[in-house]
Image (tube, grey):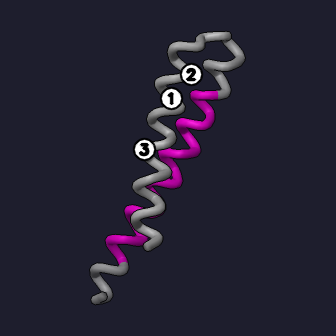
Amino acid sequence: MTYSQRSAASSDYVILEFQIGKAAEELAEAVQANDETRAANILKKLERLEEELAQLED
């Protein structure tokens, strides 16, 4: 892997971690508001983001 490829992967990793953190905050808000539909949608989003993160780690 070249330096630029490692740099791009690192950037993608940071972005995904940020998005996961943001989604976790949104999930907490949805749970607090008892909005089950929104919470379920956010959980799906979190699962997708975590899958993408796992692929980067491989």
Q: What is the quadrant of the C terminus in the image?
A: bottom left
**Residue 49, image x, y percentages:** 44, 47
**Residue 10, image x, y percentages:** 42, 71
Q: Which residue is farthest right?
A: 32
Q: Which residue is farthest bottom?
A: 2
Main SS of the magenta part reads: helix
For the residue labelled by badge 3, is the local secondary structure a helix, a strand or a loop? helix
In depth, the one of 55 and 3 nearer the eye is 55
Left or right of 40, for residue 48: left
Check if residue 19 falls in the magenta segment.
Answer: yes
Q: Vertically, is 8 above or below 44?
A: below
Disc 2/disc 3 C-alpha distance (Å): 14 Å
Q: Residues within 10 Å of mark 3 (few under 14, many from 20)?
A: few
For the residue labelled by badge 1, is the local secondary structure a helix, a strand or a loop? helix
**Residue 52, image x, y percentages:** 40, 55
Q: What is the quadrant of the N terminus in the image?
A: bottom left
Instruction: Kindly identify the amino acid type of the residue bearing the numbered disc 2.
Output: Ala
Q: Give the mark nearer the N terminus: 2 vs 3.
A: 2
Query: Where does the magenta region start and end?
Result: 7-27
Q: Vertically, is 15 above or below 19?
A: below
**Dot 2 and dot 1 residues touching (CB under 8 Å):** yes
For the residue labelled by badge 2, is the local secondary structure a helix, a strand or a loop? helix
**Residue appearing at x 50%, y 29% in the figure:** 42
Left or right of 36, for residue 12: left
What residue would you read off at disc 1? 42
Q: Vertically, is 17 above or below 56?
A: above
What residue would you read off at disc 3? 48
Q: Give the mark nearer the N terminus: 1 vs 3.
A: 1
Check if residue 51 falls in the magenta segment.
Answer: no
What residue would you read off at disc 2? 39
